Amino acid sequence: MYKIKTLNQISLKGLERFARDKYELASEIGHPDAILLRSYKMTDADISPTLKAIGRAGAGVNNIQVAKMTELGIPVFNAPGANANAVKELVLSALLLGSRGILQGVEFINNLPAGMEVNELNKCMEQEKKRFRGEEIKGKTLGVVGLGAIGSLVAEMALELGMDVLGYDPCLSVDAAWRLPSRVKKMENIQALFAKSDFITLHLPVLKETINLVNQDMLSLAKPTACLLNFAREQIVDSVAVNEALNNDRLRLYITDFPAPELLGNKKSLLMPHIGASTQEAEDNCAVMVADQLIDFLENGNIVNSVNFPGLSLERSTGYRVALVNRNVPKILGSVLSVLADMNINVVDMLNKSRDDIAYNLIDIESEVSDELIEKLRQLEGVINVRAL
């Protein structure tokens, strides 16, 4: 029986993926095999010796000590793309809010005195509606920075709305390139994208290279009439620099899902309370995706969508499998195979992949995995952990 500890409220559709005859799920489990969470910030107290995997029902993993998990040989799974449509739709609303006087018009109407006569109301609206005149987004240029699961959907949506779309992504994967509509004009550098765009939307992960990517220098390249959208991560944008650009009329508007103290009260910013993935559908999709990944890992050792381990899936050829994590240094795999040979254990199939400082192995063997074999493998220098499956 595998034990799954939930550190947040998880969608029921995700929890239902775990067969009750194989899994015990609860928020109060002392020695879990896996942890399933959303935004809960993990600490050392949450890590037990029995922990084998962590599943984040979402994309970002800033709340998890990923480097430490890697050292312990614990893969961290996430759900990239599961909330992509929810974020895309919020970006659409931001484009419309940023081009039309929608919020201002609603606020105006809501502040009118109750009980106005219909003629007076109509006359008031006719006189004042010109204050809320905006522009259509059709024909405007949208710059999309980051063309992954969300960015590519946003680009496709903008094209359907009649916008011209520029795209920039220095790490564009083959899969992402196939998803991207051919009408998206790929820019060679982000500076050119900022200079040419009427709207700029960010869809990047937080990396060393992306922290404060949008700073004073980058903002100086943008059109003074440009609108900047950030529905990716707070750390990508220097909020102080954005606030200064807004106040000095070097940026027309900033719309973000990540409010910062310096932006509160600035009427040129529209701040949302981190609701990009706050739809029932997105929560269901994330929970189901990460639940399936945890199940496949715990039962078969396969790894899909891990942020710290190599992706690796091996069809089972026998009923006996060893999953082994080791440091990515020479000769360890040879030592593992020597142990198997010395114990007269025949290898039927195996797969080995590495990622940075970690290597992961799935080995299918003909005979049952004994405690003696597991112990001998654990004693090898460089081996982090071993499981029998």
Image (cartoon, rainbow, N blue to C red):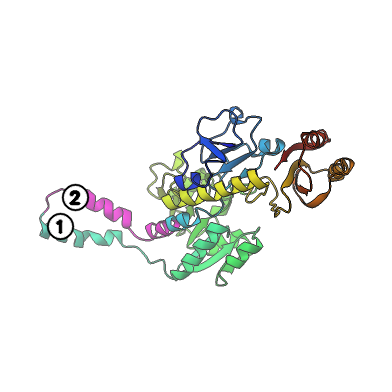
Return the x and y of residue 321 as percentages of the image width and height.
73, 46
- Graded by Cα atoms within 10 Å as few (under 14), some (14 to 19) or many (20 or more), the crowding at tag 1 reads some
Name which residue lies at 15% across and 57% down. Answer: 121
Where disc 1 sits, the SS reads helix
Most common SS among magenta residues: helix
Can residue 208 be spotted in the picture? Answer: no
**Residue 103 in magenta?**
yes
- Whole-number angstrom distance, CA of label 1 to CA of label 2: 9 Å
Relative depth, front residue between 23 and 261: 23
Amino acid type of disc 1?
A: Leu
The image quadrant that residue 24 belongs to is: top right
Return the x and y of residue 230 as percentages of the image width and height.
49, 51
The image quadrant that residue 259 belongs to is: top left
The residue where tag 2 is placed is 112
The residue where tag 1 is placed is 121
Relative depth, front residue between 131 and 234: 234
Q: Which residue reaches farthest front?
A: 367
- Disc 1 + disc 2, Cβ < 8 Å: yes
Return the x and y of residue 47 as percentages of the image width and height.
62, 31
The image quadrant that residue 51 belongs to is: top right
Name which residue lies at 63% across and 61% down. Answer: 189
- Graded by Cα atoms within 10 Å as few (under 14), some (14 to 19) or many (20 or more), the crowding at tag 2 reads few
Picture quarter with the N terminus: top right
Amino acid type of disc 2?
A: Leu
Relative depth, front residue between 198 and 87: 87
- Magenta-tinted stretch: 91-116
**If you read the primary sequence from the N terminus, does the residue marked by circle 1 or circle 2 appear first?**
2
